[in-house]
Image (cartoon, rainbow, N blue to C red):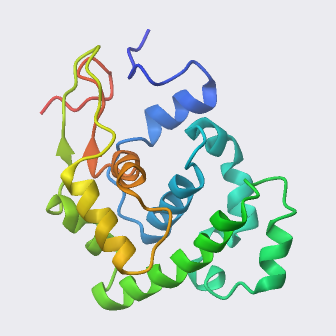
Amino acid sequence: MKTRCSWCTSDPLYTQYHDEEWGRPLHDDQKLFELLILEGAQAGLSWFTILKRREGYREAFDHFDAKKIARYDARKKAALMKNPGIIRNRLKIESTVTNAQAFLEVQKEFGTFDKFIWSFVGGKPKRNRWKAGEKLPAQTPEAEAMSKELKKRGFRFVGPTICYAYMQAAGLVDDHMADCFRARKE
């Protein structure tokens, strides 16, 4: 039996997410955008709630095509408010559109969102090795810096706690527990 991080439940969707995605370095702009939106949608909810709706989000938000989302009008936003496949929160829907616009501006300035977002960890994953019983931080100085810069650029739902969860999920930070089978040994 594989030893996993203590937060990982036995639900197959959760174990697959832990085993195949969480903490793996992500460099694809569209996937980085998707994850940023989903982490923001998670605010005040459990990650599992969002994970169960991820396919609904992909369908509702044009598979996270930032160019399309940036052009959503009031009619499209109203339709999203009626979509049972996502969290129907007006502020979170509005922020998705705003974040798509800000995302495109970052791409324009830096060439890729990847280049921008990975700059907060010097371009390579920060590896932590937490032991069983140790409490992981909810935020770090790097997450605070990321949050501040994203907010300055017009992003919403990007507080330091959301940014740290994003950093963990996108592999900017590897927070697999020391005894987890996914923990890199190097």
Q: Nearer the viewer, residue 161 or 7?
A: 161
Q: Left or right: 97 with respect to 110? A: right
Q: Nearer the viewer, residue 157 or 86?
A: 157
Residue 102, image x and y in percent? 46, 82
Image: 117 above or below 56: below
Q: Nearer the viewer, residue 97 or 186?
A: 97
Residue 103, image x and y in percent? 45, 79
Quadrant of the image occupied by residue 144: bottom left
For the image shown, how many numbered marks are present on the structure? 0
Residue 4, image x and y in percent? 40, 20
Quadrant the C terminus occupies: top left
Quadrant the N terminus occupies: top left
Residue 65, image x and y in percent? 60, 76
What residue appears at the point 62 percent right and 23 percent down from the top-left corner? 11
Image: 28 above or below 112: above
What residue appears at the point 75 percent right and 65 percent down from the top-left corner? 60
Q: Left or right: 4 with respect to 62? A: left
Quadrant of the image occupied by residue 100: bottom right
Q: Nearer the viewer, residue 60 or 1?
A: 60
Quadrant of the image occupied by residue 114: bottom left
Residue lying farthest top?
1
Q: Left or right: 8 with respect to 90? A: left
Image: 135 above or below 109: above
What residue appears at the point 49 percent right and 67 percent down from the top-left corner? 33
